Image: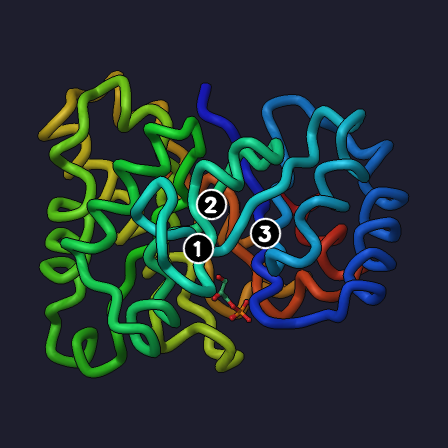
Amino acid sequence: MRQTIIAANWKMHKTLEEGLELAVAIKAHLQSAPTTDKIAILCTPYIHLFHMVETFREVDHIHVGAQNCHQELQGAYTGEISPQQLSAMGVPYVILGHSERRQYFGEDEALLKAKVDQALAQELQPIFCCGEPLEVRETDGHKALVKKQVEEALFHLSAEQIGEIVIAYEPVWAIGTGKVASPEQAQEMHAHIRQLVADHYGTATADKLSILYGGSVKPNNAADIFQQPDVDGGLIGGASLKAEDFTAIYQAG
Ligand code: 13P
């Protein structure tokens, strides 16, 4: 049985104080939520992470993640954070390849491959993002592009390593736009990704892979998307910034 994951991506939101308030509110809401085969992962700005690890230390079903890391272990890379630094602080997850990193910071598959490798070497679990821009979907190139993104960044890994990866499908045209993929569109792409993994690593490995959907997930559309057989939860941006909304989405998973 694969794990359902409802992950929050706070992006570049919340001061330290605001973030800690939100964390405490989410903890209060989710502490008594059912936990069987379902976890929450809160991916916050770096400034919150130390406190987040402390806040959720005793809560088995709420985990903490970073939104990026560097591909080197350490060194003269001013302004960067290494996977070793995250892992040593007790952070278990890191988002890699978010479309905003690809778009604004020029991250490509070769760089992401290096980041995935270094994260895994430091025992951080990558939440690897893939997804197509609108013009690619409009010309029916979405499946080919996602195949390329996943294969080039991940398919050099061993079956054991791929078991440590969470994949998030986030169509770029649905991120922050209020334009959510239909449950059928999400299911179609998730099944495609799972099939790619099955073809390369076998069905047993593919069946265990959690594939999350991201892009304008809200309390009123989460259940329909999460009900799809190959959708194992979500990666939530805007709606993760309100404890009530994030809780409602968690409960829909
Ligand atoms: P929104 O939920 O705000 O569309 O953001 C999705 C996202 O990018 C999560 O990583």
Q: In the shown orientation, is residue 119 left or right of residue 156? A: right
Q: Quadrant of residue 103?
A: bottom left
- Residue shown at 69%/29% (left/top)? 61
- Residue shown at 15%/24% (left/top)? 201
The picture places residue 188, in percent across and down from the top left corner, at 27, 52
- Judging by the rendered image, the residue that carries numbered circle 1 is 68
- Residue shown at 33%/28% (left/top)? 121
Q: Is mark 3 within 8 Å of ligand 1?
A: yes
The picture places residue 115, in percent across and down from the top left corner, at 29, 46
Question: In the structure shown, which secondary structural element does the residue marked by tag 3 occupy?
Answer: strand
In this picture, is 197 found above or below 241? above
Say what amino acid the circle numbered 2 marks. Answer: Val
Q: Is mark 2 within 8 Å of ligand 1?
A: no
Q: Earlier in the sequence, mark 1 or mark 2?
A: 1
- Judging by the rendered image, the residue that carries numbered circle 3 is 43
Q: Earlier in the sequence, mark 2 or mark 3?
A: 3
- Residue shown at 62%/63% (left/top)? 10
- Contact (Cβ within 8 Å) of mark 1 with mark 2: yes
Say what amino acid the circle numbered 3 marks. Answer: Cys
Q: Earlier in the sequence, mark 3 or mark 1?
A: 3
Q: Work out whether residue 88 or residue 120 is closer to the camera in this orientation and state it.
A: 88
Q: Label 3 to label 1, Cα distance in Å?
A: 9 Å
- Contact (Cβ within 8 Å) of mark 2 with mark 3: yes
Q: Label 1 to label 2, Cα distance in Å?
A: 6 Å
Which quadrant is the C terminus positioned in? top right
Question: In the structure shown, which secondary structural element does the residue marked by tag 1 occupy?
Answer: loop
- Judging by the rendered image, the residue that carries numbered circle 2 is 94
The picture places residue 135, in percent across and down from the top left corner, at 19, 83
Q: In the shown orientation, is residue 180 left or right of residue 12? A: left
